[in-house]
Amino acid sequence: MIYVVNFPFCNYFGLERYLLYANRVHENLTLDSQVASKDTIVLPGVGTFGQAMNFLNSQGLTQLIQRHAANGGQILGICLGMQLLFDSSDESPNIEGLHLLSGHCSAIPKTNEFRVPHIGWNQLHVPVAKEAACKHFSAFDGFSSADFYFVHSYVVHPHDSDIITACFAHPSGLLCAAVASNSIMGVQFHPEKSGSDGYALLNHLLGYSD
Amino acid sequence: MKKRIIPSILLKSGTQACLSQGFSPWRSVGTLTQNLRLHVQRQADELLIINLDQAGSGKFVLPSRLFRLVRQEVDIPIAYAGGITTPEDASICINSGFDKVYVTAAFLDQQDSLRAIANIIGTQSLGLSLPYQRDCDHCSAMIWDYRTKCQTELTLQEAVGFALEQGVGELLLHDVRRDGLLSGLDSELSKDLAELQPEIPVLVAGGAGRPEHIADMLQIPFVQGVVAGSIFSLTPATPMTIRNYCETQGIPMRRCSSSAKI
């Protein structure tokens, strides 16, 4: 089962289209959901860090998600959903994230060459091969030959760089575009809005729970 | 960042798609369903739906059939424009499945109204569409009010300056004079943008008729994408052929895996 957090503002319908297209059994995550450790929780996200965490807290979902992670359950965060996996964000000071991964989110530096919000198609740069990285994103899987759709103003800075599985290029250097640590995964871009290549990546990511 | 090719779909009388010239609809080109499927199949980078029935109406309604079709047919980013004036209107669009909204009338009537919308749906989900007109090729660009079909006293430069202060995430600059003529985009924008140095993405529309027109515009550093309608209905060009041409000109464009190319 795939459980989806239906935030008030999120790309829920884009994700739902993929789940219907891929014939994946899914339902909204609620406090009453009977989430098994083999199930997957997906956090889509549009809006602000504070809005999203306030929603999770008010719905009683924060502890449920944290418990699922502690039990080894798979979690996929998309865009803002990926940022929520971490500890905090400059976008919403004094609001705690889910603390599933260690790190902080800050605004993408603006330059003459790089417009913020980062809106549009960009390519993924796969970090130097490490076992954890290659398990989820590999040049052999073809994901580095396609571009994916980004729309965000903040970027995550994991404390452990080993969990970074893909990056995007910025004048200041490579910035984090995807993470994976045990059963926790996150992508800063929107695979559900990246056409057939995005759907292929979602098959790859969500297939890991099978 | 890769530059973007964005087909626009003008809606009139429900779900009929049409083309425009000078911001006036003049020719029907099929249904919304047909156009959505065609553009998605042809690997558009994004889509923009402009609902002419709603634009300037003063009362926002998002037809349920419209967003059901979008949810059913579209796996790429899609924006909506037409009659959005309040944060509540914008929220309805985002919650219905659109990724971005564009506003115009709200800005023309009250320039500081956009901040409230950006605070609710997020800067990255709010775009400002600015129709403009030049009296001659080298004249200043003046904002054009599509409701009265008259120029305002606001210059494009002033409007962009105000917009940047309001938390708008993206700009769409639409040349009314060139709209639908397929004769080329407004090259004078390169000077305007060089002076403005906007820090947010800028899209351009009005006049694209050949891949060369689009490539010339995308060569401008401040322009991130071109929005176009007539070129996709009246010429053989597709988003993929235009992307391929732009790549030959050294412009970074979206890559699709070989299995997805059309």
Image (cartoon, coloured by chain):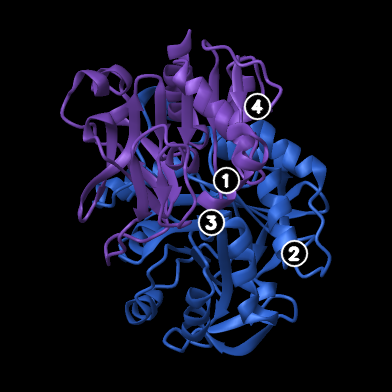
Amino acid at circle 1: Ala
Q: Earlier in the sequence, mark 3 or mark 2?
A: 2
Q: Chain of mark 1?
A: A
Q: Earlier in the sequence, mark 1 or mark 4?
A: 4
Q: Position of residue B169 (x, y in %)?
A: 49, 63
Disc 2: which residue: B83
Q: Which chain is purple?
A: A
Q: How many marks?
A: 4
Mark 1 on the same chain as mark 2: no
Disc 4: which residue: A29
Disc 3: which residue: B228
- Is there CB contact under 8 Å for labels 1 and 3? no
Residues packed near mark 3 inside 10 Å, few (<14), some (14 to 19) or many (20 plus)? many
In the rendered view, tell whether residue B132 sits above or below residue A193.
below
Closer-to-camera residue (B40/A66): A66
Q: Give me the disc on residue A158.
A: none
Q: In 3D space, how far apart are the residues under numbered discs 1 and 4 (Cα atoms)? A: 14 Å
Q: Quadrant of the N terminus of chain A?
A: top right
Eye-nearest disc, 1 or 2: 1
Label 2: which secondary element: loop
Mark 2 on the same chain as mark 4: no
Q: In 3D space, how far apart are the residues under numbered discs 1 and 2 (Cα atoms)? A: 28 Å
Eye-nearest disc, 3 or 4: 4
Eye-nearest disc, 1 or 3: 1
Q: In 3D space, how far apart are the residues under numbered discs 2 and 4 (Cα atoms)? A: 34 Å
Q: Position of residue B150 (x, y in %)?
A: 68, 85
